[in-house]
């Protein structure tokens, strides 16, 4: 029952940050918008559980509110990928071999071919740096992931008997896709969604690290790392704590993804043992 | 010139013990920005001047480390009684690095090129008053102005006014040929520029045989490179927070001086509600300068109350006009009918004084009810949106040009002040030559902008540098953008 | 096979054309003008106009697009606005850092991932396997720029074994260059190795279930011996595909790492050019990267089709 352990450990780790982010809406140890320059760069435990940053803000508060940013950006980016990618993949599969299939798949290849980070930087250079543009930049690259997965999942189903039966019953391609195919590939999508979610957290951290994510005073883990960069030699905790937050969240999501795959797709269970 | 006493003592101790080291004849100097190309007369990038000013290119006059203007390629000059004609006598025997001689024709070429219609000189206004440049003989050149200009010799000292040769102008961007004590040797783009001593130099030869400028943009990499002694000095050190570690280390000296950079919270004087002087005054009283200097610059910087450098003899301390007083600020806002505060934009260019300072100012303004939406911009965007487009509520920028209070006379300048009252002061200043009268007028100008609360005046940007303890002769202050290595040497 | 290749080739050309248009449009709408950037805040409007004319920025957009594309076809990448040097020269200069860095990182990740993956597969379900899986889970979760920061802190600032950044150039000696690339390569390689080890392990485990492996086992080869002799070679196909994809990722994906270590590579060139609005450099570099990825994909597809004729009917 190893999948269970992965799932539980992953869910606990992820849950920790999700709960932290949710609590931050109603309560935080201190106000992250108030600066206290005189109380800057305190070590963990010195009045503040995790210390203070270069502006004297409580780091635990920053991590909790920052979790909100990370989770929101990654979640919406996955949403964009699914909302656009899944219908595209279903259409491509339904029109397998046709020109629509060709156009959709070549379009996907094209998006894949673009260096994602460079394009993300360009998008934010054009439209300005903000959390919304970070979401769009990450979301665009999620589209082909879901489109491909959906198409290959759907293709393997189209030849099956129950689909044939539905066709004989006179159902159209759109209806079959929605009623018979989608429910059968939902598992695949959930697992992939978890993985893309974790990649989204990493991408958001990378973008805000180079200054292209959420703008101050909205805290974000990536920008905390960027701010900490010149201070690591004096106050290493400034870089260690947000780094650990990112690692633990991503680790949690990946473990959860593995656990879910084993749970939802018994055929694969044996392999990850 | 404010060395840390501790660093000096430790430094001299190190110098004594380092006596065994071999005499060094080259230096590697770190600098944050890489020049886009090497022609100081066709771009604004200070990074170009850092490398070429005085080292490779020289002008008729030049800046010294203390900001004074002295003779450069011009040995002497005469000014006509009406102040309209400058006759420059050039040094004899000056040659460019390619062996061609430097004479009056080159001076005429350089000045005419800078003021030409299709000139791409970034500081073209420096040459605006010139009506004619005449070659009298190979070593004499006469410059005629349309009206007297007390700043003309000062203008000719800028890096944008250096003397270039028509023979080498085509390739100046990649292979600069000047008259300086160093010759350009090599440029590994993205990494470094190397220069070597010019053995045919007309003046006092450089003490070093060669020098390397290494471009390290990232503050952490700069810190690491210095700590690892990969570089011997870093001019314009980007991370003030790391300086205490260098001060504590006997291998290094920390250089703290002053720049010409007045760092201001520029306010859009034409945008409501900031077009109301009460609102601007409220903004300035909400700002705690010391918290900004401590938080953004880790204590380095001198508070200013007007747009003028504190080290200038004509400076007037007007910080009292806008002391930190949140209650007064709230009262002023209420008086302006904005008791509930208001929301505006705060657009920040890349330097850390702006990004960090902006976060602190946003928090301070929030405390009196003014909400700011922060947008971080690249320089190119900032220039287009804020500077040219005037699409900003507030922004933070350091005005690094020396003696630039005149910008307040231009009603179209990005913060849009330019009242007739101020213009009158400037007009009078330009036609006044008596030093005391000039100082009095400059004081009037400073008071005018301070009392009209044109902008929030924050601090004079500090010139921060780190060098190995036994490097001698590096400029502490930055009267102009320059890393002049001509007098630098290693102490034994 | 020939018809298949032809069809793929035509879609490759269409892709490239679309890519060039998209890149040009996105880059050109970015606010900010290279000429004003270069001349700074004291420049007069007529000076800016003069420089724009000198840089050829005053011609209509569509004209610039066609000039750029026709230049690309002649391998002429144009001249950088800010540096005033040929873009091709700048790219090849930066390639001398980025290419070795990518190869170095790929070599490191392969050297770590292959043995780890093989070891884990041969110890399936045992403690060693669990350890490799756990480490690779961790490796995937670590942001590479954070790992890079930590390595700078430990190895450059505290231990002073390596310099914190910069690149001395190959002309100053091969080992000096390699040393400067070591920390960046490790930071890049770590997450890649983690992914690669997992792929290696799972494709080896797939192999174990294949008939020929059963046969080999039946012939009396030990599990480990069979795995080594037959499994590794056959498992290499999916692994090499991943490697190919990772390579193009590494070439462009080093952008943040190049930023942390201050390496004069392709990624930093793009980053710098975007902030300076050196549009032609941005366009050309991005186009080059897209071209590389599309071509790699094309070759991979062709190779697969050559191996497996069934794939030719699928587009």
Image (tube, coloured by chain):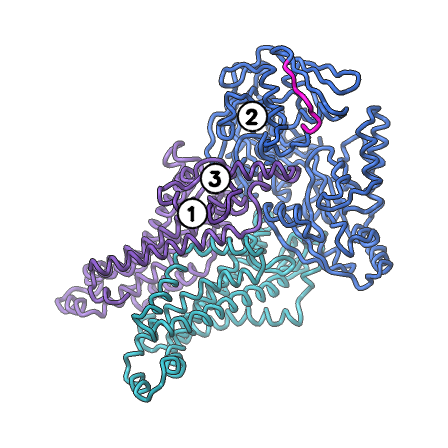
Colour-to-chain, cyan: A
> Could you tell me which secondary element the residue under label 1 belongs to?
helix
Chain to which mark 2 belongs? B
Asked whether disc 1 touches disc 3, contact meaning CB atoms under 8 Å apart, the reply is: no
In the visual, does B316 lie left or right of C78? right
Residue B17 x, y percent position in the rendering = 57, 26
Q: Answer yes or no: is residue B35 visible.
A: yes
**How far is the residue under mark 2 from the one under mark 1?**
63 Å
Residue C196 x, y percent position in the rendering = 34, 58
In the visual, does B233 lie left or right of B153? left
In the visual, does C82 lie left or right of B391? left
Residue farthest to the bottom?
Answer: A169
Mark 1 / mark 3, whichever is N-terminal: 1
Q: Which residue is mark 1?
A: C66
Q: Quadrant of residue B107?
A: top right
Q: Is residue B314 above or below residue C2?
A: above
Q: Which residue is mark 3?
A: C80
Q: Is residue B196 above or below residue C148?
A: above
Same chain for mark 2 and mark 1? The answer is no
Colour-to-chain, purple: C
Same chain for mark 3 and mark 2? The answer is no
- Residue at 73% from the left image edge and 14% from the top image edge: B78
Q: Which dot, 3 or 2, sits closer to the camera?
A: 3
What residue range appears in magenta?
B127-135
Chain to which mark 3 belongs? C
What is the magenta segment's predominant secondary structure?
Answer: strand
> Could you tell me which secondary element the residue under label 3 belongs to?
loop
Q: Quadrant of residue B333?
A: bottom right
> Could you tell me which secondary element the residue under label 2 belongs to?
helix
Chain to which mark 1 belongs? C
């Amino acid at each position: 029952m190893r999948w269970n352990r992965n799932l539980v450990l992953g869910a606990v780790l992820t849950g920790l940050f999700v709960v932290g982010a949710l609590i931050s809406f109603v309560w935080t140890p201190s106000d992250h918008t108030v600066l206290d320059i005189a109380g800057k760069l305190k070590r963990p435990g010195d009045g503040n559980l995790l210390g203070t940053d270069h502006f004297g803000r409580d780091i635990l508060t920053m991590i909790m509110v920052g979790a909100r940013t990370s989770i929101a950006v990654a979640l919406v980016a996955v949403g964009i990928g699914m909302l656009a990618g899944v219908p595209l993949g279903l259409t491509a599969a339904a029109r397998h071999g046709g020109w629509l299939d060709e156009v959709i798949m070549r379009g996907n290849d094209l998006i894949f071919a673009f260096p994602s980070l460079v394009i993300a930087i360009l998008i934010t250079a054009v439209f300005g740096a903000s959390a919304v543009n970070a979401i769009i930049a990450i979301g665009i690259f999620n589209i082909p992931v879901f489109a491909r997965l959906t198409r290959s999942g759907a293709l393997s189903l189209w030849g099956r008997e129950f689909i044939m039966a539905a066709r004989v019953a006179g159902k159209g391609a759109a209806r079959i896709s929605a009623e018979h195919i989608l429910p059968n590939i939902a598992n695949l999508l959930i697992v992939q969604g978890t993985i893309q979610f974790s990649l989204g957290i990493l991408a958001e951290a990378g973008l805000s690290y180079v200054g292209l994510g959420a703008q101050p005073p909205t805290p974000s883990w990536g920008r905390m790392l960027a701010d900490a960069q010149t201070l690591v030699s004096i106050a290493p905790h400034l870089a260690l704590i947000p780094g650990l937050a990112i690692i633990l969240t991503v680790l949690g999501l990946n473990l959860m993804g593995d656990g879910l795959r084993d749970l939802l797709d018994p055929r694969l269970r044996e392999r990850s043992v | 010139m404010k060395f840390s006493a501790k660093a000096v003592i430790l430094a001299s101790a190190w110098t004594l013990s380092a006596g065994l080291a071999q005499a060094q004849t080259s230096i590697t100097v770190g600098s944050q920005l890489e020049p886009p190309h090497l022609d100081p007369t066709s771009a604004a990038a200070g990074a170009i001047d850092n490398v070429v000013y005085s080292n490779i290119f020289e002008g008729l006059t030049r800046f010294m480390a203390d900001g004074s203007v002295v003779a450069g390629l011009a040995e002497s000059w005469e000014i006509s009684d009406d102040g309209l004609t400058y006759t420059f006598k050039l040094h004899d025997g000056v040659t460019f690095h390619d062996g061609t001689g430097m004479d009056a024709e080159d001076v005429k070429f350089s000045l005419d090129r800078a003021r030409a219609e299709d000139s791409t000189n970034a500081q073209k206004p420096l040459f605006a008053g010139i009506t004619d440049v005449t070659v009298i003989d190979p070593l004499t050149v006469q410059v005629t102005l349309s009206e007297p200009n007390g700043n003309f010799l000062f203008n000719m000292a800028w890096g944008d006014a250096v003397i270039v040769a028509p023979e080498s102008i085509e390739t100046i961007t990649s292979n600069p040929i000047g008259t300086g004590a160093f010759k350009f040797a090599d440029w590994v783009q993205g990494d470094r520029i190397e220069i070597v001593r010019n053995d045919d130099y007309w003046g006092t030869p450089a003490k070093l045989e060669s020098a390397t400028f290494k471009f390290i943009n990232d503050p952490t990499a700069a810190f690491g490179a210095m700590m690892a002694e990969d570089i011997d000095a870093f001019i314009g050190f980007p991370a003030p927070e790391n300086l205490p570690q260098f001060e504590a280390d006997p291998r290094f000296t920390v250089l703290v001086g002053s720049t010409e950079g007045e760092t201001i919270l520029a306010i859009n004087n034409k945008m409501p509600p900031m077009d109301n002087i009460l609102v601007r005054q409220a903004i300035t009283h909400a700002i705690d300068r010391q918290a900004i200097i401590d938080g953004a610059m880790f204590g380095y910087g001198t508070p200013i109350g007007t747009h003028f450098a504190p080290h200038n003899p004509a400076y007037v301390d007007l910080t009292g006009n806008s002391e930190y007083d949140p209650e007064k600020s709230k009262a002023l806002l209420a008086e302006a009918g904005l008791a509930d505060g208001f929301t505006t934009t705060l657009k920040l260019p890349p330097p850390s004084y702006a990004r960090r300072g902006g976060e602190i100012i946003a928090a301070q303004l929030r405390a009196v009810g003014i909400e700011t939406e922060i947008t971080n911009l690249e320089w190119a965007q900032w220039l287009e949106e804020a500077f040219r487009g005037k699409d900003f509520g507030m922004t933070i920028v350091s005005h690094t040009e020396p003696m630039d209070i005149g910008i307040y006379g231009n009603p179209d300048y990005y913060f849009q002040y330019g009242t007739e009252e101020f213009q009158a002061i400037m007009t009078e200043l330009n036609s006044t030559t008596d030093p005391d009268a000039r100082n009095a007028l400059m004081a009037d100008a400073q008071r005018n902008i301070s009392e009209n609360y044109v902008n929030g005046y924050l601090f004079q940007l500090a010139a921060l540098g780190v060098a190995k303890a036994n490097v001698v002769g590096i400029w502490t202050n930055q009267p102009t953008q320059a890393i002049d290595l001509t007098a630098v040497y290693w102490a034994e | 096979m020939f018809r298949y290749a032809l069809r793929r080739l035509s879609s490759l050309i269409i892709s490239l054309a679309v890519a060039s248009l998209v890149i040009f449009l996105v880059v050109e709408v970015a606010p900010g003008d290279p000429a004003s950037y270069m001349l700074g805040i004291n420049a007069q409007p007529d000076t800016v106009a003069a420089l724009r004319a000198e840089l050829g920025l005053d011609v209509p957009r569509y004209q610039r697009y066609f000039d750029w594309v026709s230049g690309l076809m002649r391998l002429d990448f144009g001249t950088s606005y800010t540096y005033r040097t040929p873009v091709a020269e700048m790219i090849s200069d930066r390639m001398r850092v980025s290419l070795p860095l990518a190869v170095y990182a790929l070599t490191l990740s392969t050297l770590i991932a292959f043995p780890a993956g093989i070891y884990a597969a041969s110890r399936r379900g045992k403690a060693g396997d669990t350890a490799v899986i756990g480490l690779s889970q961790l490796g995937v979760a670590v942001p590479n720029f954070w790992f890079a920061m930590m390595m700078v802190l430990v190895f450059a600032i505290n231990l002073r074994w390596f310099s914190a950044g910069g690149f001395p150039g190959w002309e100053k000696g091969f080992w000096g260059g390699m040393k400067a690339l070591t920390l960046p390569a490790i930071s890049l390689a770590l997450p890649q190795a983690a992914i690669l080890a997992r792929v290696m392990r799972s494709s080896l485990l797939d192999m174990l279930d294949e008939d020929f492996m059963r046969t080999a086992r039946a012939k009396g080869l030990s599990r480990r011996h069979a795995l080594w002799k037959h499994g590794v070679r056959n498992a290499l196909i999916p692994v090499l595909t991943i490697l190919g994809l990772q390579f193009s990722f590494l070439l462009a994906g080093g952008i943040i790492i190049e930023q942390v270590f201050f390496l004069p590579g392709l990624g930093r060139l793009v980053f710098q050019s975007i902030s300076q609005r050196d549009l032609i450099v941005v366009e050309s570099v991005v186009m080059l990267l897209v071209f590389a990825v599309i071509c790699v994909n094309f070759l991979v597809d062709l190779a697969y089709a050559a191996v497996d004729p069934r794939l030719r009917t699928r587009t």
